Image (cartoon, rainbow, N blue to C red):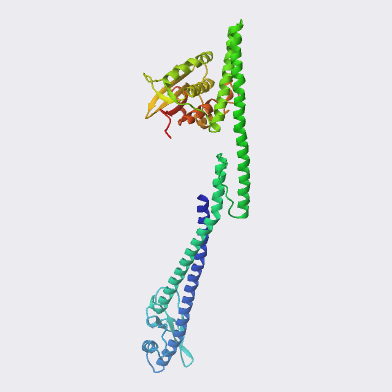
Amino acid sequence: MRLFGGLYARLTAQALLVAALPGALLVWNLGRGHDSYIAAQDHHALAGLATLVSTEMRTDAAPQVALAAAQRDFHDGQIGGDPIAPLIDRVALYTPAGALIGGATPDTSQAHDERPVRLGGATVALLRIVRAPATGGAGYSFMRDQIVGIVAAMAAILLILLVAGYNIAAAWTRPQRALYRASRAIAQGDYDTDVSEEGPAETRATMRNLGRIARSFDRLETARRTWLVNVSEELRKPVQLLGDKLIALHETSPVDDQTAFEDIVGDVQRLSEMAEDLHAVAMADLGRLPVTFATVDPVALIHNAIWTSKRRAEAQRVSLEPGQLPPTTVPVKWDGARIEQLFTALIENSLRYTPAGGRIALGLEGQRGAWRLIVDDSAPGVDIDLARELFEPFYRTSLTPGESVTTYGLGLATAQSIVEAHHGRIEASPSPLGGLRVTVVLPSAPPTA
């Protein structure tokens, strides 16, 4: 829309210039021609009037009387028979030295025309036009009508140009807008968007190239998603077998260093969690994350998540505790295993950025047919300006990962996948504890189809 508006504004400005400039020049030229015409009429009439005054003065009439008689005869049409530009009340008679003899009172406008009054070849007086023509009359009516006609014609031309400019702008920007919409959709990951070829040859070629890029990206994205699912599937099986074999081996042949064995089992467990997170993200990317809804108690799930991650938190000297929870059982229809995976991912994310001596609290609050799962951690936490990037797979806020194997960067991406599969939302905000608060809002039951 801005492209159309900008182009139409430029075309409108040009239309105004095309219509207004010639119109102004026509009006100016008409005014100048009208003034020249009036001046020529006055000059011609003044010459005739001077002749009449000279004729009257030959009868020994006083100059003032001769001027009055000449004006009367001139007005009656005795000179030329067509008093087009009458000079009545506009002329005065002067001596050759410039003294006023009689006639109209001079105005303060610019100097006007004058003619000598001769008797016997000698100049006996000067007849001058001392006042500008009166506004009105047939000449000025004609001038007004011409100006109105010019303005009307220029307005009609401007209207035609504006309509033509609108059609030109619409026709020119239509393929540009289609190209913009297609490129925006492709940039947002919609590779199946309509890439219609229309407009000039260059635009059609660009649309064809954009379509080829979209199809190429679609193939690459499909291959990437399929590859991630296959890798996560292949990774889950050996890791699970490795954990089972370690436990079976320990039962048949207990090791002497129990602490080292527990560390190995813990590492295998975290590797298994990483494989599960990768599988969840990959399946959600394909839109096929499996969830099985059943009646569960989120309060019990929170306590179970705290118990599961307690040893890991204690190893980092971080306090993992329940926050504000309902006093009674809360029945909801969620996928219990996925929600436990969600809590594990959120706790692991907080453990990654919470230093020794810090706190992590898990809370639950009701909200109009939904529940808010809240995970707070203490300072320093994560910069809230990076909240959008926090949910990207493999994102980390530091170039130097910590010692924990959980720095594979799938925690919040996994959480987001699970939340979306439950038709909820997840967001990050500052925590009252000074660090990061991650809030998950889930409906009490999945929406009915």
Name the residue rendered at 40%, 92% in the picture.
56
Whether residue 399 is visible to the viewer of this picture, yes or no, is: no
- 59 up-or-down from 424: above or below: below
Near-viewer residue (62 or 77): 77
Q: Residue at x 58, y 54 (%)?
A: 199
Q: Where 173 sits versus 234, above or below?
A: below
- Residue 322 falls in which quadrant of the image? top left
Which quadrant of the structure image shows residue 214? top right
Residue 199 in view in this figure: yes
Please determine whether, in this image, residue 202 is positioned above or below residue 125: above
Name the spot of residue 180 as percent of width and height, x first: 55, 47
Position of 338 with respect to 222 (left or right) is left
- Coordinates of residue 319 in the picture (x, y in percent): 48, 15
Name the spot of residue 336 as percent of width and height, x first. Answer: 46, 22
Q: Choose between 149 and 321: the one closer to the eye.
A: 321
* Residue at 55% across, 55% down: 172
Q: Quadrant of the C terminus?
A: top left
Residue 383 screen position, x and y as percent: 51, 28
How many marks on residues?
A: 0
| View extreme (top): residue | 256
